[in-house]
Amino acid sequence: MQRLAVIGAGPAGLAAAQRLHASWPELEISIFEKSRGVGGRAATRSRPPFRFDHGAQYVKATTPALASAIAAETRHDITQPVWLLHADSQITPGDPAQNIEAKWTYADGLTRLGRELAAGLSIHLETGVGQLIQHGLQWELIAQDSGSLGRFDGVLLTPPAPQLRTMLAASVLPAERQAQIDAALAPASYRRCLSLALGYATPIERPWYALINADRQHPIAWLAREHAKPGRAPAGSSLLIAQMSPGWSLAHWATPVEDLSGAIQPLIDAILGETLPAPVLVDRQGWRYALPEAAADGAALHAVNDGLFWAGDYLVGQGRVHRAIESGWAAAERILARR
Ligand SMILES: Cc1cc2nc3c(=O)[nH]c(=O)nc-3n(C[C@H](O)[C@H](O)[C@H](O)COP(=O)(O)OP(=O)(O)OC[C@H]3O[C@@H](n4cnc5c(N)ncnc54)[C@H](O)[C@@H]3O)c2cc1C
């Protein structure tokens, strides 16, 4: 193999490319990313004077390899615990075993992780791949909004499974393999999530960093005091992240952002037990494919030796940055084995 294309510059694609770049320098790696930046769903947005992670909230490092991948000099542990949010808006302390694990973030946002993983790699931003065409042993990539992106000996596919299914349905490859890939990806459906950022000119102090609704009975799936992280909000002000349940998200998908705080504020007030002032910032991000519900059939995807390689949280079946990184490393090992 001489040329590899990586589709997607999220944690899985970047981790795979980084490992291959280090252990196989002669391999020409081109990464195609449809958005304007790297990091995928581990993303940060700046709305001065606020800055917030509107996708993944923090990263866990459960092995020494992951700990060294998460740049030690700049990372920050969110030491305050995650508590439980119940259906009746009551809250209780969370799992002590979970809460002693470090929750890593960065002062300039979780997107730093993507930028660190992207160092030294060749990345084509704002280049969505719409189609693959198989030419014998090679694959040609066609951009979503222009022509050919070139031919490659291998392609690593990392976008969420539903987006891959759309891309592959438009692609040119033997019908039998196309159907087999589609069936293998189908189990990895994703939960939708409307993520809201609400900034306040007053302090909100609590003994917890965030609340998680583990039983999925509350419209708010996750409520975080984003200002518990460094560099997120000016002193004396506060910033909440509310990630809404799939049902609430779907019902409010088209609601204008200026109307969203009116819909959510009573829910937050009931949890906090106080009436907050009107927010000075309301921002929304709709994640159509936020978190996988189940894993794709990796064995079926990997079984055919046709130059397609697979990595991402759709293979893991769990929406976790560190698991996506490990999935990228596993893909790199499969590619190295075909050297
Ligand atoms: C609201 C929310 C909260 C979360 N909270 C946490 C958390 O607290 N902790 C945690 O560990 N994880 C969390 N996650 C999950 C975590 O973000 C994902 O598991 C992780 O980002 C998956 O990485 P990935 O590389 O598999 O996919 P992605 O991060 O989605 O990367 C895939 C990349 O492919 C790109 N792409 C898609 N289609 C194309 C195309 N056609 N052409 C080119 N590029 C394309 C996308 O733009 C994206 O950059 C959260 C996710 C969301 C949405």
Image (tube, rainbow, N blue to C red):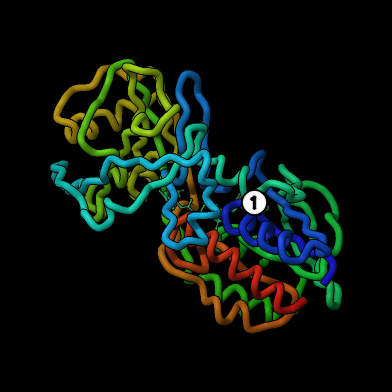
Q: Is residue 285 above or below residue 205?
A: below
Percent x, y for residue 184? 55, 76
Percent x, y for residue 74? 51, 39
> Mark 1 belongs to which amino acid?
Ala
Q: Can residue 138 be spotted in the picture?
A: yes
Q: Is residue 202 above or below residue 244?
A: above
Name the residue located 53 percent from the left edge and 64 percent from the top edge.
Answer: 326
Q: Is residue 57 above or below residue 205?
A: below
Percent x, y for residue 41? 52, 47
Left or right? Give the position of 247 relative to 276: right
Q: Mark 1: few, some, or many residues within 10 Å (few <14, many ≥20)?
A: many
Residue toward you, 13 or 67 = 67
Q: Can residue 260 be spotted in the picture?
A: no
Badge 1 element = loop
Name the image quarter holding residue 328. Answer: bottom right
Left or right? Give the position of 109 relative to 8: left
Count of labels in the image: 1
Percent x, y for residue 258? 41, 23
Name the residue located 29 percent from the left edge and 38 percent from the top edge.
Answer: 209
Q: Is residue 310 above or below residue 285?
A: below
Q: Quarter holding the C terminus?
A: bottom right
Q: Quarter holding the N terminus?
A: bottom right
The residue carrying mark 1 is 9
Name the residue located 71 percent from the left edge and 82 percent from the top edge.
Answer: 305
Disc 1 residue: CB within 8 Å of ligand 1: yes
Name the residue located 28 percent from the left edge and 56 percent from the top edge.
Answer: 98
Residue toward you, 68 or 43 = 68
